[in-house]
Amino acid sequence: MSARALAPVRRRPPAEDPFATLNDEQRAAVFHGAAQAAPPLLIDAGAGTGKTLTLAARVARLVRDGADPQRLLLLTFSRRAAQAMQQRAGRLLQRALGQPATAAPPQQPWAGTFHGVAARLLREYAPRIGLSEQFTIADRADSEDLLGWVRDAQGFGRTHRRFPLKGTCLAIHSRAVNACEPLAEVLATRFPWCAGWEAELKTLLRAYTAEKLRQQVLDYDDLLLVWHAMLEVPALAAALSARFDHVLVDEYQDTNRLQAAILYRLKPDGRGLTVVGDDAQAIYSFRAAEPRNLREFPGRFEPPAEVLPLQRNYRSGDEILRACNAVLAAAPGPFAKTLWSPRSGARPQLVAVADEGAQAAWVADAVLAQREAGIALKRQAVLFRTGHHSAALELELMRRDIPYLKFGGLKFLEAAHVKDLLALLRWVQNPRARIAGFRVAQLVEGIGAAGARRLCDALDAAADPAAARQAFVPPPAARAPWAALCGAIAQIAAAPWPAAFEPALRWYLPQLERLHDDAAVRRADLELLQRLTGGHRTREAFLAELTLDPPEACSDEAADPQLDEDYLILSTIHSAKGLEWPVVYVLNVVDGCIPSDMAAGSAAEIEEERRLLYVAMTRAMHRLHLLVPQRFHVGGQAALGDRHVWAGPSRFLTPAVMDGLDAVGPLPASPGPASAKSPGPPETRIETPAGPVVDLGAALRARWD
DNA sequence: TAAATCAAACTTTTT
DNA sequence: GTTTGATTTA
């Protein structure tokens, strides 16, 4: 073994060909083009067709053939996906180079989400674009609060007619930015009830942009917007484009117009560009994702990009795939694929139950039965449309002592105590961040909204906000507690990371005890937060990555995975994207849940709900259970309210789908009529902003002129 | 005048 | 369970 390790790496013949197990479809995608400047490629990868493996193998193959891993950009949908991809590519590469498995695999440092990569690039280029290197990133709640504050300051809170709420204003902002649409068009197509406020909204969003720049705070949308703005400046565009020889993008059907525009500016001729996607799994249009990015990709280039499909499914038995195909057959997309597998297995089940209680009991029974049969809890997943759909099941699981981990829905970062502590750290890093300061100041005993406002105004007016913070004279009653906060801030600022977390926590814990009855439970969250600090090298990195990629599970009864060996997976369908489990249960496959009655507006929305069911079903490897409660709670009432509706099975369970399902329990009523085929969305063009500018602020403000 | 307290409404999906 | 608004209290 040691002799092998000592041998010069380049002389070692590969112990085995890591690409030998690829099928023909995958091999074609992996070996498309030369290692340098390969022509553009679209991998049209159906669910479970080995997409991750193929992309990882392509990365490994490019590096093996001479590409520099440092000059390779891998854009994925989540950080989790990026890590999975890096690991697999690393292992494949070791084998391709004949390295021992003990050697450190070559890392690809540029892998992550669009937003994550943007944050890193902006931090690096900040001095060249008039941005402070200390800029902080606001999560959605903070962005809403800041926008709400600007909205009040502009006097829109006291209008004669009702002005859109802060959340709506931010949604409008987000839509306009991500879809690259003019404000008027966004209002007309998405927010018709706000159309009368166009001029005011324009003023508001311009003021919001100015305020963010003044405070050196960027929201999610700004990360992409500034990246794009940088690519408008020829010198910066040249530097950024030259930096990467290859750009590979995963889940391309869920990118938006702005992301596509970034990509085309990064690689104008498409050389070195690879995108992977499946239009049947487009489920993020509520976030301005534009599946047409995928459809239009080949034609963007001359000659058009090559399209290579992957249809051989390695995940599921053929019975499950037939049912999945049948769901989509009612509304085939332009890249219609038929998944197939030579493997045969159990037919999927349609389980009719009386109500949500019976549904929870049935799932709990089934989960335990499978566990007895040797399928660990971890290898089973319960999927649902919205976070609270699992409430009844969670009660049942707790009652039966079945540990579980829930993804999606309740967010760790949204808990008040976590936000408090993060606000403190943000405020230390960037004293101009008004929302953070406003929040932290109010934690001080004796300072309320009015005192906090006075403090923030003073900081705003000061040339040196950190000094103004020290000089602030609190109300007499708050003197001692305020001094304690100032002391803590000084310690946090002085200490290296992650030691700086300690004084922050020490200051906050007494406030936690004072403000919350359930301090003990919340304290556990803060300890989890503390454990996360170690994984990041600097405070900036910690704050940025936590904002862009929050821990996915909430801690409460969701047992600490390190304590419980085995736990059942609960997940929203959206959060289940890209994952697979041997046994999958899908809750509430009824009209009103799937499709959600919130989404019943347009035909396009209904079609997205259909794909959502498709995504849920294609997660299953061996067993799939669709649950249909005949009665379920309607929302908009107290948690224990007793209003129900009698629901029919989801309209997506067409006769063709039902043919492939085994009915369990009393047969449900026949499904409703299939929805009409959707007309395509209206044509939109990418708006090209005015010529190159180096003044970032002017570029961003111009967005709202 | 500002802070603390209490009652009531709202809760899709997420970077 | 959090946020918002109205009321009471210092």
Image (cartoon, coloured by chain):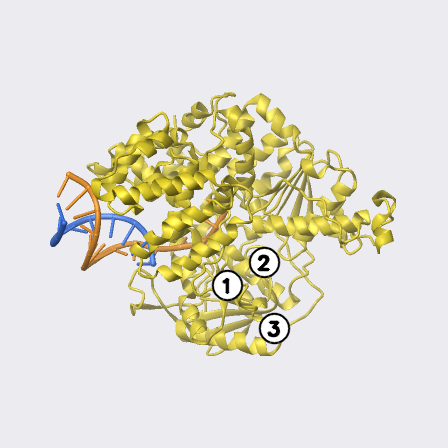
Chain colours: A yellow, B orange, C blue
Subunit bearing disc 1: A
Could you tell me how far apart the alpha carbons at marks 2 and 3 are, in whole angstroms? 17 Å
Answer with left or right where residue A378 lies relative to residue A526.
right
**First in sequence: mark 1 vs mark 3:** 3
Task: Report which residue position mark 3 lands on.
Answer: A375
Task: Answer whether residue A169 is visible to the viewer in this image.
Answer: no
Q: Mark 2 points at which residue?
A: A579
Sequence-first tag of 2 and 3? 3
Amino acid type of the residue tagged 1 in the rendering: Asp
Q: Residue A170 appears in which quarter of the rendering?
A: top left
User: Residue at (39%, 53%) from the top-left corner?
Assistant: A415
Is A633 rendered above or below residue A504? below
10 Å neighbourhood of mark 2: few (<14), some, or many (≥20)? some
SS for tag 1? Answer: loop
Q: Which element carries disc 3, helix, strand or loop?
A: loop
Query: Residue A252 or A337: which is nearer the viewer?
Result: A252
